[in-house]
Image (tube, rainbow, N blue to C red):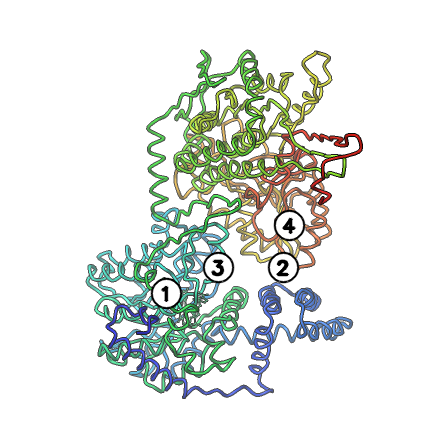
Amino acid sequence: MDSNLDWLDDLSPAERAQLDLRARQIGGELFGSLERRQAHIWQWRYWDDRILDWSMRDERLKVQLFRFVDVLPMLHSGDAITGHLLEYLDRAPGRVAGAARRALHLADRFALTRSLVAIAARYSASNFARRFIAGENLPTVLRAARRERDLRRGFTLDILGEAVTSESEAEQYFRAYLELLETVSPEVRAWPEDPQVDRDDRGPLPRMNLSIKLSALDSQFDAIDPQGALRESGARLRELLRVARQQGAFINVDMESYEKKDLTLHIFKTVLAEPEFRDVTDVGIVIQCYLRDAERDLHELRDWAAQRGTPVWVRLVKGAYWDYETLKAKANGWPIPVWQKKWQSDANFERQTRFVLRNREHLRPALGSHNLRSIAQGIAFAEQLGVPQNGLELQMLYGMADSEKRALVERGQRLRIYMPYGDLIPGMAYLVRRLLENTANDSFLRAGVSERATPDMLLGNPASRASSPTAESAKGQSELREPQTTQEAPMPTTFANQPPVDFALAEHREAMRGALAQVKSQLPRTCPLVIGGETIATAATEVSIDPSQRSRVVGRFSLAEREHVDQAVAAAKRNLPAWSALGAERRAEYLRRAADIMRERLFELAAWAVLECGKPWREATADVDEAIDFCEFYAQQAIELERPGGKDVPGEENRFVHVPRGVTAVIAPWNFPLAILTGMSAAALATGNTVVMKPAEQSATIGSLLMEIFQQAGLPPGVLNFLPGRGEVAGAALVDHPDVALIAFTGSREVGLAINARAAEISRGKTARSRMVKRVIAEMGGKNAIIVDADADLDEAVLGVAKSAFGYAGQKCSACSRAIVLDDVYDTFLNRLVEATRSLKLGPAEEPSTFIGPVIDDESQQRILKYIEIGKQEGRLVLGIDAGKLAEQGSFVGPHIFADVPPTARIAQEEIFGPALAVIRAKDLDEALQIANDTDYALTGGIFSRSPQNLERASREFLVGNLYLNRAITGAMVSRQPFGGFKMSGIGSQAGGREYLLQFVLPRTITEHTVRRGFAPPSEDAGE
Ligand SMILES: Cc1cc2nc3c(=O)[nH]c(=O)nc-3n(C[C@H](O)[C@H](O)[C@H](O)COP(=O)(O)OP(=O)(O)OC[C@H]3O[C@@H](n4cnc5c(N)ncnc54)[C@H](O)[C@@H]3O)c2cc1C
């Protein structure tokens, strides 16, 4: 028996063989009737095909060409077009690119030829676009639909566009969907009937068929908040369903990326189970067979439809986001949700096709594919089940596989064409996806049309394409039988970041909700001092409160006085010799144990951060992730650091080692309440120092939890001491203490500079005990800018700036507080940014939908409000959200955007640490860079640009510690983006990087002269 056919385990061996034979027969017939005629040299299509052919031969050229297509709509002059084309080709080595580059360089010399190149490039791209996009307005799309009908094919319309960044854009989308339903439906109803298109075995079908995306109906469509998404997009979906019913039209819900999949299914099922829509039959949804979840989702959909009592349509596809899903999961360390081998997606598509066909009573089948084998298998299985020919709908994309379409219609199959319509600019992303699909190595179309593979190869059972037949099929079979969302992650051999919590998973949302409830039931937590392993409750205490709700006391903490500082430093000093002698390996064990405890308590710790520091869910879990990373990373780095170095020569042995500096004072801020406190402490501990840890007053409870975790991890008493208290008392006493060798501080510039000055003063003292120069590591503020270039992808730039400026209410030292925007795109960018920001939800941190929570306390709120008043004088207030009633219960400040701010204005120069953004106009990149660098700070910065030259220039000239190209500027990850700046932003090297630990140690070199009376032991270095 051919073990590969085990994939077909829902069939008996005889059925299997019969099905495969028939699928090959049907596929062969279809393949034989394909028109394999090439376009002529005078047709545009000929040139389109040549370009695709060239690009397919060289992956790097392909990437550069598609990048050019992507940016083209933003280029408005001949110079910009030829300039970009040259820049991209310069980055594509190879013969074809070289020839094109030489020709272009020639053309670039003269204004006339430059313009001609620009016209040709535009024309060619629009032609490409027109191949895949049915029209830019209603009349053209109607004409295209009519042409399809003349070819005996139905249609489904899709409105082009990618990211919906604001409520106003969601409203526009919704209106456009309504307009399509209301204008196209009556028109197409009047067309004469074509039974091959207009009927299936159950009767007439709606002619107007609209494909919609639920995320287009709600700018905050996010799985973290299913209720909110259901409320917003559900309301609009209901309205569309009502109008569709009036107009006799069909609504299909498309499927987008994996993070939206469960939410899309949830909203679809919830709305369509409501009494008003329970009987709607003209409605469908997409299931993507490249997903491991597909089988489970289909089973659940079938059960739901059976319960509902009315069937729904299912469009089975493989899926359009394979690369994105793969790289996103890899980047986050998540299980990869899509099959990793093409044949697995193909085999799954076949298996799910059979499932849907068997369950036709509840799930009406539509197959969306251009793969003749996938289609033929579907037709063959439908035949075997006795499904009438018109009982199976086939669907294909506009502009693709035209000869297949003809062959299928001639065979009498019912075929519907997916017709995207809309402007070229939003259309470019769609176009690039289609180009990628047409030229992908694994694509059926590429194999079938471009490379002339044999029918046998193309039409064979997908399982037979498994590279290692026995092993692969056995593995694949069990994977397919039990669809899972998880995959065994390989054991990391080096440091790997803690995967961020994926709130698209219901279990994580549940865990967060549960943790919040549990933590709330324990409030307030009592937080004593811990000195030498002893807990000390002081008479005087202070409280930390929930900034989202002033009446909620989160923690009650003891206040360390000067005497406690003396005791804690003494305990740390006493324990220093034993701890430092332990060695990095043993110390690493404690840190790794602490990391494990944090992993176990992840949601609980995050809940404390939500309640004590007003961190929204994602920010709060990311804070715990980072704390875990610091423990793991520094543990590993300290082991590396401990390996002795040194070069021996005959007669001389050299050892280069590091020793701890001594007692370390860690003075931490509240904005990353667990991560920064853990990071600074873990670095000191890993390298053999002992620590006195002082958290910020606003986050003392989280500090006490960290102390508890290290105690649970078994850290010897006195190695880490915990001193909550006032900065002016406990903090100042720690800085002053002569036995404190190192101060690791993160916080404001004012305090950082004061600590630095004070440490120098103390070091100058003449007492016997101050025999060292105190070392200060200080991470201070920023006035971070993002430059938006004239050719930037504005979808990305708007979202990137909004996230960087208003995430955690702008209270990250990495936050963006200046957007420097080039003249050409200034107004468009500003309008979209204002609308996008207006749509962000301001609210209590514990609500999952909240994007902007409170600021840390009332003092901070008042300071920010003062800056807002200054901003009103210095710039043009274009958005000022009033926190309204929220401000009565907590320390809320709504987001504010000031436009046309002079670069030297106070709000463009001073750190505000709140949700206020200055937007500054720049005439060109020179000016933008000059403005960006012209502050006291140099922490983070970013640029959105699609010009490789401009990106390179920014890399050289935009002088900040962390520069981000084409992404948000917050969210640095340990090891991947070591974090920290210079100028007034900090003293010291970047946290989470390889050099960070060097600041916690002293270098020593030990040299031994090994010659005794003219002889010496052999030296290893000398190879003797
Ligand atoms: C009418 C219609 C509507 C569609 N609607 C949607 C939709 O709403 N949402 C959506 O996501 N897609 C949708 N698609 C599907 C998508 O856009 C692609 O067209 C489709 O996946 C291509 O599959 P194929 O069978 O035509 O080609 P094939 O060449 O047989 O398959 C290509 C597909 O295989 C998968 N693949 C590629 N490489 C690998 C690999 N290494 N391992 C595993 N799998 C791999 C990918 O899904 C890729 O697209 C739709 C397609 C059509 C025709």
Q: Looking at the image, is mark 2 or mark 4 earlier in the sequence? A: 4
Using the image, determine if residue 638 lies above or below residue 977. Answer: above
Res 99 → quadrant: bottom right
Which of labels 2 and 3 is toward the front? Answer: 3
The residue singled out by tag 4 in the image is: 787
Sequence-wise, which precedes: disc 3 or disc 1? 1
Between discs 2 and 3, the one toward the N terminus: 3
Q: Is residue 656 visible?
A: yes
Residue 289: give its label. 1
Q: CA distance from mark 2 to mark 1?
A: 33 Å
Snapshot quadrant of residue 516: top left
Q: Which mark is residue 946?
A: 2
Closer to the chain start, of discs 1 and 4, is 1
Element class at badge 1: loop
Kindly check if marks 4 and 3 are in contact, taking CB atoms under 8 A apart as contact.
no
Amino acid at circle 1: Cys
Residue 324 image label: 3
Mark 1: is the Cβ under 8 angstroms from ligand 1? Answer: yes
Tags 1 and 4 touching, CB below 8 Å:
no
